[in-house]
Image (spheres, rainbow, N blue to C red):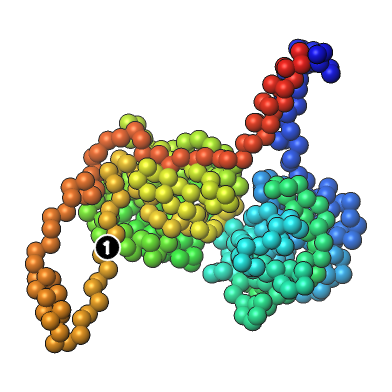
């Protein structure tokens, strides 16, 4: 049987090149997209004026909620300063992909997403987050921060999809400007970025205090200008870890804290899309302290070969600095053979005068068993395997490319 067509051998490299370059075609330019829709010309103008368009274009996964010219008139009537106006518009840009289909398939009917306003570090508490609710009758509502009511204070609703590049950028129209007193507040003049102060405001005060008391803060400060990414355990997480932290030597404490920083800027989108090891601030000479990142769906996980932590929130994500909250303390292999055991919960008190109470009191007086030596932090345990691995499962296009090329070879 003769093949339906014959593909010249010299064209195979060209085919492969076209397939490999297809990912570059997924880049986006928000001003060009909105230029096709004159009803959003005012919104588009202020994206350019505030330089927010540049931030949107360099992000790999993004959703832009646009408002028509009439809706922008209500916002401009407030006569906000340009920095405050940028904060309000930043609240309309989500650091995740929400196309029309995804909006109507939200798990459990409601979700919360981080915005570029949250990434600035200017947002207090949850002011930089937006709640998205799939309401009855096919409507989708949007609300900022902590709102109450059946659907919260849903100040805006989904109108239509303007343009989408699946899983890269979604441009959607919403009915009204998202309201936020925090975003509209006057913005102070530019000053030196204080990373520890930002941590203190966003639930990482305990970690910031350790940086100051240990002397590790200076290393973080020195890397701010060149680029810095910090994975910050929240206060509750660090509180339960403190007994193990106190067992470390002074050098071990500093190394542990430096292990939570990398000397380069990595946005959340960059962490989701790139594989490979990264050095940490603790890496020096023979001390590896390598860092890696592993994706689990939309979640970004940090695996140290001892524990696996998940990024749970954003403190700031603006080049050259990113600080993310995590749900576990990162334990490098250089310091820990295994994760320290979690503190045992206190036994519930037995009724007074009961026989069981007397037996429990007797058991409580007995000496505690000796701790397993392997569970004690070993500051000087050398290992080249202390890595947090970054794995990305979005490489399906490569499999498609190889399948097409192999199929073509069959017909040659």
The residue lying at 69 percent from left, 31 percent from top is 400
Residue 9, quarter of picture: top right
Name the residue carrying label 1.
Answer: 343
User: Is residue 235 toward the left or the right of residue 323 in the image?
Assistant: left
Q: Is residue 184 visible?
A: no
Of 156 and 223, nearer the camera is 156
Please identify the residue farthest to the front as the structure is shown. 1
Please identify the residue farthest to the bottom as the structure is shown. 353
Q: Position of residue 54 (x, y in %)?
A: 72, 48
Task: Identify the image quadrant of the C terminus.
Answer: top right
Dot 1: element: loop
User: Is residue 342 toward the left or the right of residue 304 in the image?
Assistant: left
Residue 337, quarter of picture: top left
Q: Position of residue 43 (x, y in %)?
A: 81, 60
The residue lying at 59 percent from left, 58 percent from top is 119
Q: Is residue 103 visible?
A: yes
Please identify the residue farthest to the right as the structure is shown. 38
Of 199 and 99, nearer the camera is 99
Q: Position of residue 364 (x, y in %)?
A: 13, 71
Mark 1 surroundings: few (<14), some (14-19) or many (≥20) residues within 10 A: few
User: Is residue 396 toward the left or the right of residue 343 in the image?
Assistant: right
The residue lying at 75 percent from left, 26 percent from top is 18
The residue lying at 58 percent from left, 66 percent from top is 123
Of 308 and 203, nearer the camera is 308
User: Is residue 93 toward the left or the right of residue 227 in the image?
Assistant: right
Q: Position of residue 269 (x, y in %)?
A: 61, 47
Say if 349 sits above or below 304 in the image.
below
Say if 402 sits above or below 51 in the image.
above
Task: Identify the image quadrant of the N terminus.
Answer: top right
The tally of labels here is 1
């Amino acid at each position: 049987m003769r093949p339906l067509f014959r593909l010249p051998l010299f064209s195979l490299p060209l085919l492969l090149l076209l397939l490999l370059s297809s990912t570059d075609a997924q880049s986006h330019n928000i001003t060009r997209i909105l230029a096709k829709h004159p009803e959003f010309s005012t919104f588009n103008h202020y994206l350019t004026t505030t330089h927010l368009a540049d931030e949107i274009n360099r992000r790999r996964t993004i959703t832009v909620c646009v408002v028509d010219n009439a809706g922008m008139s209500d916002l401009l009537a407030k006569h906000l300063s340009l920095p405050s106006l940028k904060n309000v518009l930043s609240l309309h840009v989500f650091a995740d992909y929400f196309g029309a289909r995804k909006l109507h398939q939200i798990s459990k009917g409601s979700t919360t997403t981080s915005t570029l306003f949250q990434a600035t570090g200017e947002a207090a508490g949850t002011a930089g987050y937006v709640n998205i609710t799939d309401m009855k009758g096919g409507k989708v509502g949007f609300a900022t921060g902590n709102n109450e009511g059946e659907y919260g204070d849903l100040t805006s609703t989904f109108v239509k999809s303007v343009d989408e590049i699946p899983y890269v950028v979604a441009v959607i129209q919403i009915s009204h400007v998202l309201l936020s007193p925090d975003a509209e507040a006057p913005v102070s003049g530019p000053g030196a970025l204080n990373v520890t102060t930002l941590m203190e405001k966003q639930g990482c005060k305990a970690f910031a205090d350790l940086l100051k008391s240990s002397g590790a803060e200076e290393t973080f400060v020195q890397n701010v200008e060149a680029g810095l990414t910090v994975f910050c355990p929240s206060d509750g997480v660090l509180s339960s870890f403190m007994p193990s932290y106190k067992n470390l030597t002074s050098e071990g404490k500093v190394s542990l804290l430096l292990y939570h920083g990398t000397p380069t800027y990595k946005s959340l989108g960059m962490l989701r899309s790139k594989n490979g090891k990264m050095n940490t601030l603790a890496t020096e000479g023979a001390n590896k302290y390598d860092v890696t990142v592993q994706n689990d769906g939309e979640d970004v996980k940090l695996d140290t070969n001892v524990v696996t932590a998940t990024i749970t929130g954003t403190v700031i994500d603006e080049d050259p600095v990113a600080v993310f909250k995590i749900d576990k303390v990162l334990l490098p292999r250089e310091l820990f053979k295994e994760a320290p055991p979690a503190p045992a919960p206190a036994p519930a008190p037995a009724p007074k005068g009961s026989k069981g109470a007397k037996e429990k009191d007797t058991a409580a007086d007995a000496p505690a068993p000796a701790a397993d030596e392997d569970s004690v932090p070993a500051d000087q345990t050398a290992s080249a395997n202390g890595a947090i691995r970054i794995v990305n499962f979005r490489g399906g296009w490569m499999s498609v490319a190889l399948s097409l090329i192999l199929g073509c070879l069959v017909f040659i």
